[in-house]
Image (cartoon, rainbow, N blue to C red):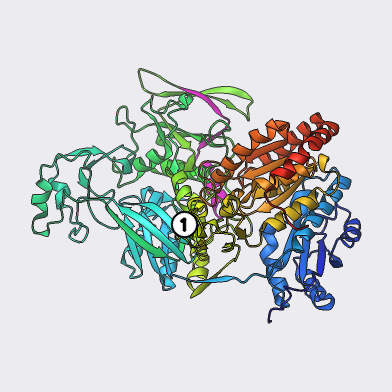
Amino acid sequence: MAEKKVEFEEPRIGVFICHCGLNIAGVIDIKELVEYAKTLPNVVYVKDNRYTCADPGQEEIRKGIREHKLNRVVVAACSPRMHEPTFRRTVSDVGLNLFLFEMANIREFSSWCHPSTPKEATEKAKDLIRMAVAKARLLHPLQTIEVPVTNKALVIGGGISGMNAALDLAEMGFKVYLLEKGESIGGHMAQLDKTFPTLDCSICIEGPKMVDVGRHPNIEIIAYADLLNVSGYIGNFKVKIRKNPRYVIAANCTGCGECKEACPIEYPNEWDMNLGVRKAISVPFDQAVPLVYTINKDYCIECYKCVDACGARQAINFEQKPEEIELEVGAIVVATGYDIYLPYDMPLYGYGKYTNVITSLEFERLILAAGPTGGKVVRASDGQKPHSVAFIQCVGSRDKNKYPYCSNFCCMYTLKHVVQLKEKYKQDVEVYVFYMDMRSNFKGYEEFYDRARELGVNFIRGRVSRILEVPETKNLLIHAEDMTLGEPIEIEAEMVVLATAAIPKKGTDEMARILNLTRGADGFFMESHPKLKPIDTPTDGIFLSGACQGLKDIPYSVSQGSGAASRAATVLSKPKWKIEPIVSVVDPTKCRNVNTKCGICAERCPYGSIKVEEKKPAEVITAMCHGCGTCVAECPADAITQMHFTDAQIMAQIRAALERDPEDKILAILCNWCSYAGADLAGTSRFEYPPVIRPIRVMCSGRVDRDFVLEALRLGAGMVLIGACHLPYDCHYISGNWKMKARMDALAPMLQKLGLSPERFRVEYVSAAEGVKFAEVVREMAAQMQALGKEKIKAENAKLRPVLENMLKRKEKK
């Protein structure tokens, strides 16, 4: 439908209030909200709906726009992070511009976090609606920006999930670059002997897929390489990669292995968890893809025997240097996997101290026919087969002092090992499993658990307290509590196998910095929304696959790889991609760079999207602008505006929030991707806190101008809170939080010198995963505000107000 031209019309605002079943209506008085909304300026229509996001609720919005000639819409419901796109589409269906819509978050920010105080929750919901209406009055229609799409993809990580994503995208006809840090694709699955619960040969399943990846005409494997930098935006990412020297020319290497046979040097094989050895020139395993040999310069003595063995092929090049390459892609799939925790710092288990205490992955390499012992399970101390083996679950995982989460696949991993061990050695080996809870949740898993019990495995529910070695025999004495019997026990075993925690891949923090991704409290990458966007990341065009997002087994990793490929294809299949026009715009009549050298905006922009030329106004390259708004707050001439988050709109929200009883309220400005998301999570998790906070959403804390703080205090706010992403690297906009910090670090002592109690102005760094922290911060601030007392706050305000009015640099129209 053609878009209506309403920009110069008097605002006619419709307010639609959602019950969300009883999620909102069970706490908040909806009728009272409806009657209150009718009194707000420019509101001409108010309607409540049981479920506004459902089709009937959306039709009520369309009907209201048509029948009441609405040119602005406010929906009071859930978080805009959930349904803002839904309602934008709804208003556009009947010709209203997408950006003439605003949401009031009365579920996550009111009913869900204040269920014990329904009256106060209702009053807060009124304020939130009033704030949304105040912004809606000042909204302007904006046009989306279209950018061309590079229909190529980058997949980072060549494990089973990354390979599946790459193959699916390649089969759809897209060019795929598969970046692998190691010498070969395959990931952890290539290290395994069998897979549960069917005990299929792991490499027999994965090997053909690896070959398919290596041979696919649309896939280019870039192995033994590191990701250095990613810039750009959805549809147009520029990627810089460093290919590390193998000292073997890949194009000349045939994978014959003659160089390996000639090499006299051996060193511990990390692929075998250092239980075996490999040559200084070798491949990690026989089925490696690409099958290109690598020289380890840390061990190579440059005897040149490999050169002689290679002969006319001339594949050896000791002078090979690192090579940097640049790629352009339209979408990125992150599938970097996980690492295994080695419990050297948990002395109670004796790992690294007692030679017969090993990890599950080390056991995996022992029982593998292609492993260092040819599939024989033997003790490191004497090379003999053990007649009793104890498996210990949850080593490091489900442990509040280490990794509090469940590693997801360890239970089944251990069941696989005990079944393999019992079926291999039958009654010749006694097997014990110490566990907390045996989690066998998926298809065929419970039956596999039954199979282990039927083989005579001894399952002991209880935590191990310590392991000691018998010096003469090198056997292990395991001290534990049997929770079934309710008493301590001691068991002697000839070998102990630790099922250790799976942890974020080494370098995940650096990867998060390069890609502007958020990590959860567990250290894994966070998805955009756990239910609605479990594969997307907060950075448009970047998707998650496999264990890098959270621990999962092989079937789940494979399916998520396909899911990530499908999400990436939604971008790559389009010739152009629409970008939200929430960008910065320079007023050339105000820009100082015309008359004098300035360029502060260009210096502060995290993306280099502002062009500054001598004696010319600064110019924002809109396709590169990510809409953080940092330049707006930094501009000394107030010459820059961020569309949809203008100074006037934010100031209007501040004034609306503090219209009634300002001394009792905390005015909060929260960044969209982290602190606002953390506040959402507090609501979703039903963490209660006092109903005193009035939040305003900005895209980035870098957008927070000191005038926002001054205006809130001038109006009498009890306290002001700025919420930002964690330093140093969690900012979705690279460095916006640092720019805000510098600004506020300068402002805070100035306010204190003027007589402001230090507790009344606070900056907090809250991640999207820290709902608990957000609730705790609000509780703490509410207690401090109560301790200060309303009269003291009023007295401070009276003294500060004339000074603050002078400090305010913007004199806006009211």
| Residue 6 locus on image (x, y percent) | 74, 75
Tell me if mark 1 has few (under 14), some (14-19) or many (20+) residues whose alpha carbon lies within 10 angstroms of its own: some
| Image quadrant occupied by the C terminus | bottom right
Q: Residue at x 27, y 52 (%)?
A: 286
**What is the quadrant of residue 779 in the picture?**
top right
Q: How many marks?
A: 1
What residue is rendered at 48% in x and 75% in y? 575
Pick whichever, 444 or 781, lies toward us. 781
Q: How far across and how far down the image is residue 685, in percent?
A: 71, 46
Is 445 one of the magenta-colored residues? Answer: yes
Residue 590 lies in quadrant: bottom right
Instruction: Examine the rendered structure and indicate whether residue 341 appears above or below residue 604.
Output: above
Using residue 562 as the reference point, say whether residue 666 is left or right of it: right
Q: Which residue is drawn at 59% across and 44% down?
A: 740
SS under mark 1: loop
Residue 789, image quadrant: top right
For label 1, the residue is 608
Q: What stretch is highlighted in magenta?
A: 443-467
Q: Is residue 324 left or right of residue 100?
A: left
Residue 201 seen: no
The image quadrant where one finds the N terminus is: bottom right
Does residue 371 appear to the left or right of 104 in the view shown? left
x, y percentage for residue 266? 20, 39
As displayed, is residue 537 above or below residue 43?
Answer: above
Q: What residue lies at 48% left-to-right and 65% top-to-bottom?
A: 565
The answer to whether residue 776 is above or below residue 12 is: above
Q: Which of 461 and 763 is in front in this view?
A: 763
- At label 1, the amino acid type is Gly
Q: How far from the left and from the top, in percent, is residue 404?
A: 57, 37
Q: Nearer the viewer, residue 246 or 126?
A: 126
Q: From the viewer's side, name the closer residue of 377 and 313.
A: 313
